[in-house]
Image: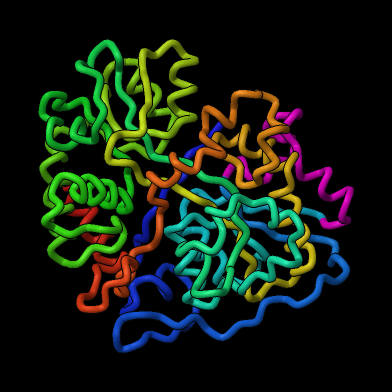
Amino acid sequence: MRLTRTLGCTAALGALALATACGGSSTSTNSDGTFTPPRLNAQKTLGKGEGEVNLIAWAGYAEDGSNDKSVDWVHPFEKQTGCKVNTKTAGTSDEMVSLMKTGQYDAVSASGDASLRLIASGDAAPVNTGLVPNYKNVFASLKMQKWNSVGPVAYGIPHGRGANLLMYRTDKVSPAPTSWSAVFDKSSAYKGHVTAYDSAIYIADAALYLSKTKPSLGIKNPYALDQKQFDAAVALLKEQNANVSEYWSDYLKEISAFKSGDSVVGTTWQVIANLAQGEKAKVKAILPSEGATGWSDTWMISAKAKHPNCAYQWMNWIVSPKVNAEVAEWFGEAPANSKSCALTSDKSFCTTYHAADETYWKQVHFWTTPIQQCLDGRTDVKCVPYAKWVQAWTQIKG
C-alpha cells in the first residue's frame, strides 16, 4: 500500500534556489553557482540511546500497528533499543524541509527533491555509514548518489526506490503504447483523458522525453536544464495541458479515474497499477522506451539532532533485511537492502518491483533537486534552479 506524496516548493527561493528554500539555514554560494555545504562533522562513535527519537516520515514508513495491527516495525524497535519513536507524518517534501529547520526532529525520510536542500542549508549532517552495519548490504547503485551525497561525503542511508511508469487502459488505448509519446506527441488522441503527476518535478519527465526525441537540445540529465532546454520542456507541457483531464497527487483518485475511464493514459507508480488491477480495472503499467523518472528516498539525520544515537539505531533498523522487506511491501517500492528480497511475504514481490534488476534501474532517473550548478557536469552554462521550475509549473497548469 503506497500513500500519497506530493513534491515541489511553493515558497520563494533565494539565489541558490535550493538550499535556503522553504526552510533551512545559511549556506555558501560560489560565484559559479555551485554550493559548498556547511562544514559539519559526522558522528564518530555510537553512544547510549537517549530514550526516544523524533522522526519525520512519509506515511507508511514508520508503521506502529495503528493502521493495520499486523504491520508494526516501530514497537519491536522500541523494545530492542529502548528508543521510543515519535513520528510526524509529512505530506510533502516542502513540509519535511520546513520541519527539519525547527531542530525538533532527529531524522527524516527525504526524497531527492528535498535532500540537496537539506544538505546545502546545513539542516542535515553527514552520516557515518560505519555506524550503520546494515548499510553494507544496501544496493551499491543507491549509495553515494547526487541526491544523497556531496563529493566523497555521505548524507544519508538509502531506504527504497521506485519508478514513475506509464499506465494505460488496455481496452481504450490502441495500439499498446511503448513510448511517452502517448502522453506528449500523441496525447491529442486521448484529449481530456490524459493524467499527469502534479508536481514541478514532472518537468523532468518532459525533459527526459525530449532528450530522446530531440537530441539536438543536448539534454543529458533531466534535472540539469539550461534555459533553452528548460523552455523546450515547459513548452511541451503547456501543449500537453490542453489534453490533461487531471493532475494527480492522490493515488486513490488516480485509481478511480482509470476505473471510470475518465483517465486512460498517464504517469503512475507500480503499486497504483497493482491496486487498480486488483479492483478489476483494465490497466497495464510499463517502463517506456525512453526510460522514466523515479524516486530514491534517504534517511537523513538532523544537524541539530537531540537524540542522534537513537536516530542512528533507527536508520540501521529501518534498512535491516526483514524490516526493509516489510516496509517495501507495505509502501509499494523496491527495498534498498539486497538481502530483503529473500524475506518478503510475496516471493514474487522483488521481481515485480525490479529490486535487483540493475539494468532496469539504469533507465530510471531519480528525482534530484535542480540547482544552478548543472548536475550533468557542464560549467559553461548555468542551469535553471528549482525556484524557476516551481514558477513555471504554476504557468503550465494555467
62 inside magenta stretch: yes
In the rendered structure, which segment of residues is drawn in magenta? 59-83
Q: Quadrant of the N terminus?
A: top right
* Residue 315 image position (x, y, % from top left): 70, 57
| Magenta region, main secondary structure | loop
Q: Is residue 145 above or below residue 139?
A: below
Q: Residue at x 35, y 66 (%)?
A: 11
* Residue 333 image position (x, y, % from top left): 54, 38
- Answer with the quarter of the image where residue 272 lies: top left
In the shown orientation, is residue 247 left or right of residue 74? left
In the shown orientation, is residue 240 left or right of residue 361? left
The type of colouring in the image is rainbow
In the shown orientation, is residue 291 left or right of residue 57? left
Q: Residue at x 80, y 60 (%)?
A: 52
Q: Residue furthest bottom?
A: 31
Residue 397 in view here: no
* Residue 162 image position (x, y, % from top left): 48, 41
Q: Residue at x 72, y 76 (%)?
A: 43
Q: Nearer the viewer, residue 55 or 156?
A: 156
Q: Is residue 343 above or below residue 283?
A: below
* Residue 72 image position (x, y, % from top left): 75, 37
Q: Nearer the viewer, residue 247 or 230?
A: 230
